[in-house]
Image (cartoon, rainbow, N blue to C red):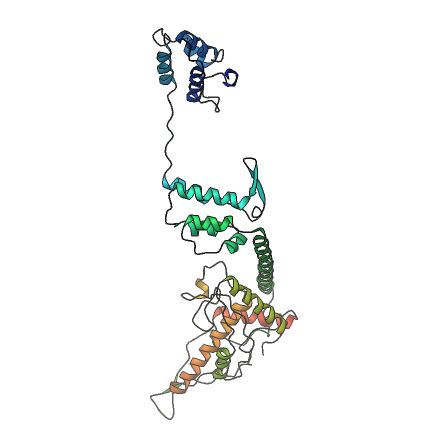
Amino acid sequence: MTENIPKFWGDDEHEDENPQDFINSIEILFVQRPTFTDTQKLKTFQLYLRSGSVAKQWWNGLPTTDNDTWDHLVNAFGKRWPEKTPTLKTVEEKQAALERAKITEKEVGTRVKLQGVEEFAHVVWADKVEKLATAIPDTNGLLIGTIRKSMPKSLQKVVGSGHRDWPSFCKAVRTATLTEIEEAKKEEEEAQILRDEVKKLQSLQNTSVKGISAAFQSLAINNTTPNVRFPTPLARQPNANNPFLTQTPPSAPNPPAYGRDRPPAARMEDVIRLALTIQPDTPAGRTAYNTQITEWNSNNPRQFVNELRPYPLSPGTSPVASGECWKCGKPGHLGPNCIVTDQVPALEQRWRAIAATIKRENNLAAAESINYVSTNETWLSREEYDQQVIANFLANQGKGQGSST
C-alpha cells in the first residue's frame, strides 16, 4: 500500500499533484495501521516528502509546535496548502458546454470505446448531452431545437422533430438503428450532390454574364444596340378636337425587340397564364425547383426568356411583375439598392425585368386611351437597357441563346 503513494513535491509545477489527495492517502495508510504512534506518523509523513522539494524545505522550517503531534502537523499542512474550492459554473457556461457537444456526420453510426466497451458514437453523444442539459438544468427542453439544428442531417431525419423534453429526444437518438442511419446518410449524400450541381450551374451562369459584361466594355457599340431611349420629358401639343387634352408628337417607330410588336395586354395575359409555380423554400421545394430548371434548360436550349418562355423562380421569392427586386426576388427595394449577396440566377433576373416591363407597358397602354397618345418608343431603366444590350450582343456574336421571340 505504501508504494502506491507518490512522493510529494509541494510546488505548482506538478499539475497532476493535489496536496489534499496526498495528505488523505497518508491518513488512509494510518487507518490501516491503527497502532501507529504520533512519532511514527510524523516520521512516515517526512519520508514521503521529495528530497530538495518545496515540501521538504517547508518541513525543515516548521516550528516545533507544528510538528510535535500529527494533528498539529495536519493543521499546519492545511494552512500551507489550503484546499481550493472551484468556482461554480454559471448557467451560461453550462449552456455553452452543451452547445459545444458536437457529433459529425462521419461519426454517426460508427462505434467508439467508452471505458473499455464499444458503443455507437451517437449513443455516447446522447448520454453526454442529456447530462449537460440536466446540469443546467433545461427542464423544459428549450435548447432541444438548437442542439437538433447542429446535428448531422442524417441524424436529424432519423430522430425527427417535436421532442419536448431531453429524455424523449435522447431516447430517439439512442434507438436509431444502423439501417435507418445508413439510409438517411445515402439520401443526404444524393441531396448534397444535387445541391452542388445547382451551385455549379449558377456559378457558370454568373461567370458567363460577368465575362460578357467585361468583354462588352472593350467593344464599341454599333448599330446592333437596341434602339431605345431613357425617360425624357415629352413635349405636349394641344389636341385639335379638344383644347383641354394634349397629345405627344409622334416619332419614327423603333424596330420591335423581344416580341414587343404584340399588344401589351396580350403579353401581360401570357405572363399571368404561363407563370410557373413558385416552390416553397424547403428541401422538397428546392428539389422541385431544380427539376424545373433542368426541364427549362432541356426544353429551351440556347433561348432567352420571355412571356412565352418564363424562367423558373427561386424558392420562396415573390412573383414576377409584383414590384419585387429583380436581383434577389424579394419585395421592399429595387435592384440598384439590393445588398443581398445570395442573388437569383442571371436568367431569372432577366425574366423578372422583362415581366416588369410588360406590366408597365400594359399600364401605359391603358392610360394612353384616356389622356394622350404615346410614341412607339419604349422607356427602359438603365438596368433594362444594359441587359438588352448584352442580350443582342450575344445573339450577334453567335454566343447567345437565340431569339426570345
For image coordinates 50% across by 78% down, the residue present is 271
Q: How many marks?
A: 0
Residue 349 horizontal/vertical position (percent): 51, 68
Where the C terminus falls, by quadrant?
Answer: bottom right
Give the answer, above or below, for where 91 lies relative to 188: above
Residue 385 horizontal/vertical position (percent): 51, 71
Which residue is situated farthest in the right direction here?
398
Task: Please state if 397 lies on the left or on the right of 248 as rendered.
Answer: right
Residue placed most toward the observer, 291 or 16: 16
Give the answer, above or below, for where 208 lies relative to 170: below
Residue 164 horizontal/vertical position (percent): 40, 53
Residue placed most toward the observer, 132 or 118: 118
Residue placed most toward the observer, 89 or 240: 89
Task: Please state if 194 lies on the left or on the right of 342 as rendered.
Answer: right
For image coordinates 48% across by 80% down, the residue present is 268
Residue 300: tell me if it is visible. Answer: no
Residue 300 horizontal/vertical position (percent): 61, 73
Give the answer, above or below, for where 391 lies relative to 15: below
Residue 291: tell me if it is visible. Answer: yes
Residue placed most toward the observer, 28 or 145: 28
